Image (cartoon, helix red, strand yellow):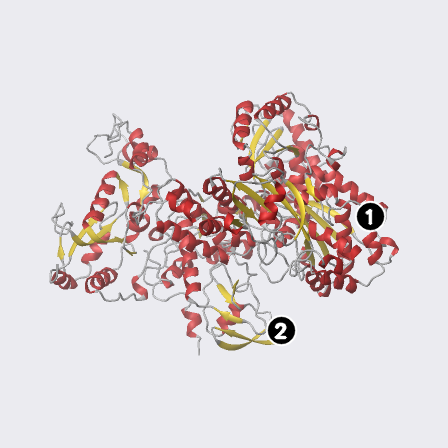
Amino acid sequence: MENQKPIIATASLAGCFGCHMSLLDIDDRILNLIELVEFDKSPINDLKKFTRHCDIGIIEGGCCNSENIHMLKEFRKNCRILISVGECAIMGGLPALRNGIPIRECIEEAYWQSPSVKGHNPEMILPNDQELPMLLDRIYHCHEIVKIDYFLPGCPPRADLLYDALVSIITGTEMKLPYEVIKFD
Amino acid sequence: MSTNGSVIRCSIDGKEYLAKAGKYINDVARENGVYIPTLCNVIGIHPQGACRICTITVNGRMMTACTTPVAEGMDIKTNTSELQDLRKSIVELMYVEGNHFCPACEKSGNCELQALAYRFQMMVSRFPYTFPKRKIDARNPKLVKNYNRCILCKRCIRAIKDEQGRSYFAFRKRGHKVEVGIDVDLGKFISDEVAQKAMDICPVGALIKKEQAFRIPIGKRKYDKTPIGADVESHHV
Amino acid sequence: MKPPIPEITDELEIGEQVYQVTMVEIVHGIIKKYGSNPTRLMDILIDIQSEFRYIPPLVLAEISKELNISNIDIEQTISFYHFFSTTPTGKYTVYLNNSAVAYMMGREEVAQTFEREVGCKFGEVSADGMIGLFSTSCIGMSDQEPAALINGKLFTRLTPFRVKEIVRDLKALKHIDEIIVEGLGDGANALPEVHSMVQNNIRKKGPILADGYKAGEALKKIVKMKPDDVIAEVKASNIRGRGGAGFPTGMKWEICRNSPGDEKYIFCNADEGEPGTFKDRVILTEYPKMLMEGMALAGYAVGAKEGILYVRHEYGYLQKHLEKVIEGGRKKNYLGKNICGREDFDFDIRIQFGAGSYVCGEESALIESAEGKRGEPRDRPPFPVESGYLGKPTIVNNVETLCSIVKVIVHGAQWYRSMGTKESSGTKVVSISGDCKYPGVYEIEWGFSVNDVLEMIGASDVQAVQVGGPSGTLIAPNEFNRTLSYTDLSTGGSIIIFGKHRDLLKDVVLNFTNFFIDESCGSCSTCRNIPIHLRTKLEKILNARGVDKDIQEMLEWAKILKASRCGLGQTAANPIVSSIKNFRPLYDQKIQHGKDFDSSFDMLKAVQESCDAVSRVPHVH
């Protein structure tokens, strides 16, 4: 383990990939980061499966379906440190606006009623293939499902916050938290 | 006991101050550049210690700075680590009590609850989110009352009455079911000025004047770059 | 002049319009009775509720017009109190107590029988609108549970069999006074103006409850004294408030007397709502003259001309009895003008009823309530002794305190101090309930140990004793040598015994926590929220999903409550904190060891709704 670069894995669950975009927003510092770490399972390198145990897992998005739950548990199993990144992972975010609305209503809206589908689903099909993930009764934020070690808020979290957090975890230095970097929007 | 108006001596965080007896601790502290975080308090409106964020200790006893007048010999502590954590925990409580989805809120950037969370560096609430089912009431011609965001500070209740002293706003129910209702009949005749005042006095985005939102771009809003309380602290000499 | 006809909604027919007008006339009569005074809103609403068995939304506009306050001003008061309703509650309204003791004594079977016989669930009204079933917090009958209030009348020691009889009688439209399934209670309970089956169960009398009280003796003595000397005597007795907080009574009186103002008020707090407490009910029933005399004494001492006896709604069945005693006092010149011949000693009493709210037992909330508002405690300072009822200096004393002072005046401070302990002088009337042979009211000297009490009441195989009600302490046998006193185990009067067979966490701690959640006024962010989070944790532990961290967090979060404005909020975590402290093994048995995180997430439950919606079988592995 010594002298080896820390390994990072990332995932976007019920999110919009905005947090991943923000990670790319660190601009040329990404070159520094590449010096410091290696990526395993992540949409950034398109690696679909864990190939080894990782040091840091970064989770964007909360859980809206059974697949998200499995993925999140998989990350917990394979990562030493797990970080919830962004409003959706931390408190459900935009998808959580459906919390409190009966799920039947949400599904009907999505497949029958909304302007883009109205009239285009004459057989009134509701997707129910066994291969599809099952929707949860509401959005669950990540620390309701597994233990989360750190939280980085923002929608998305500022690039500086992500970069500083990663560097401080990797180098074991204290994290700088200037006022401007902690924002919830 | 010291009578109102007489000058008394008290200590705030170990420093001695002279102040007029009867003045609230919060006001005395502000005038001397000591920022005590508040949320339900509005200067000039009769205080009501509802949010408990300005909790301080007076001679070791917890009191609210917005409602307690200064008196001779008080030993006031405003900033112990216990008090700081208490305040942070109260902000965290409020975040899970309602549905505070900042990215979609018209008040984001100008919201005092959010500003306190920034000041206290809240990364996540220590309490479980409750996702209560709350309504949005847009029946009033001027105002939208969004119950998801209301933190029950009673600012609107206390500050806004009609010319006969009747309430536009009041609490309904009790305990965790408490909510701030708008009087349907009186509310029909609410003026633009009163509606604006309601929106301005609301520390969060629970009262929004219609056709007013999102006018200031991100980066230029009140608390984007300046922490809440910085104005008080900059007075410090 | 005819009253205006209220807005009639479309559904109403001609016949009902006539009814509406009658309703408006009745409401106008009620408002006039209280001088169209907004500070009497409580009384107005109580009368309307009792007239129609609910507060029809239509009358809000009328009250609003007559009192010149907005609808929402009225709504805020209505929606605060448990016994006000804006929807019909049935021709007969059953409020069944849901306290821990009620459950211990068989509440579950009684409730099920009610539901079966009436044909609706608790929280509902039967389809024909005849009978409404509701739950309510402790109604002060812990020594004769399960108990229910039906249209203000008390039904105690209920069994499934009795419930069947009662429901049969209700369905036969009997008048509530005719439905008494057993004989009348003892003492004044049997008087025609009370006509109640409630039992006093006075098991031990001391100097306060002793026979041979002579009404007026203390008054005749004080009219020859200077008010300051009366206060000096009270101070010398060392008596402290008997409601639970234990503030020195003489000092309270002195501050009030010295507060500037020509109008002052004496409040008697008869709003005992701490679950397990019922001693004030017994005093109100058997010793009301002594209580009135105590209020008059206080009036003389501090210079107040008006007394307000604030009685909890649940004791409304004593209203005629209490009014008769007040009337009798006036006739004897113990109340009214120039009392006992002393010029300028005028004092009279009115009764203010509550409408169901535990927090109104807090003195400033009680005053708010008597002013017609929500029972929210006030910020202090100023204290009521400086600025209380209508902003005037006000004393609020407990029922037992005022009665004790009558004896102090008659027999002297020295005599009083010879009883009890050095710091806690005199006697204490306690209400004892739960697993013991002789539940009831006992007057004991301060300094009794818990062991002494258990012996006295015939309790064996005791697992725990709750001293001071839910806001007090839950103690274990290794502490039964502790004594009842202001310096050790302080109590406003409630002592509940739990036998070895009880599930303390589920039957007691969870029940008490629910009580605090139900009774919070909701004003403080802390008290409104923390007990809910604590309950979630407790339920997680009870469901065997807890981990050690949950216990640690409960203790941490409980501390936040200390920042609440009033005693209710500050003590709302006491059931949890004192049970963790004194019964830790009960928690340790239920948590999962060697685990630092447990999600309460249940996948099958979480996907059920969506799978049903699209006709799909959940597959969870």
Q: Is residue C305 left or right of residue C525?
A: right
Between C218 and A177, the residue placed more toward the observer is: C218
Q: Position of residue C78 (x, y in %)?
A: 59, 42
Q: Amino acid at mark 2?
A: Gly
| Residue picked out by circle 1 | C214
Position of residue C432 relative to residue A165, above or below, is above
Callout 1: helix, strand or loop?
loop
The residue sitting at 58% across, 40% down in the picture is C459
Name the quadrant containing residue B204. Answer: bottom left
Judged from the image, the secondary structure of the residue bearing numbered disc 2 is loop
Can the viewer see residue C353 in this picture?
no
Quadrant for the N terminus of chain B in the image: bottom right
* Residue C439 at x, y percent in the picture: 62, 39
Residue wearing tag 2: B5
Question: Residue C256: which quarter of the image?
Answer: bottom right
Between the C-alphas of marks 1 and 2, the distance is 50 Å
Which residue type carries mark 1? Lys
Disc 1: host chain: C
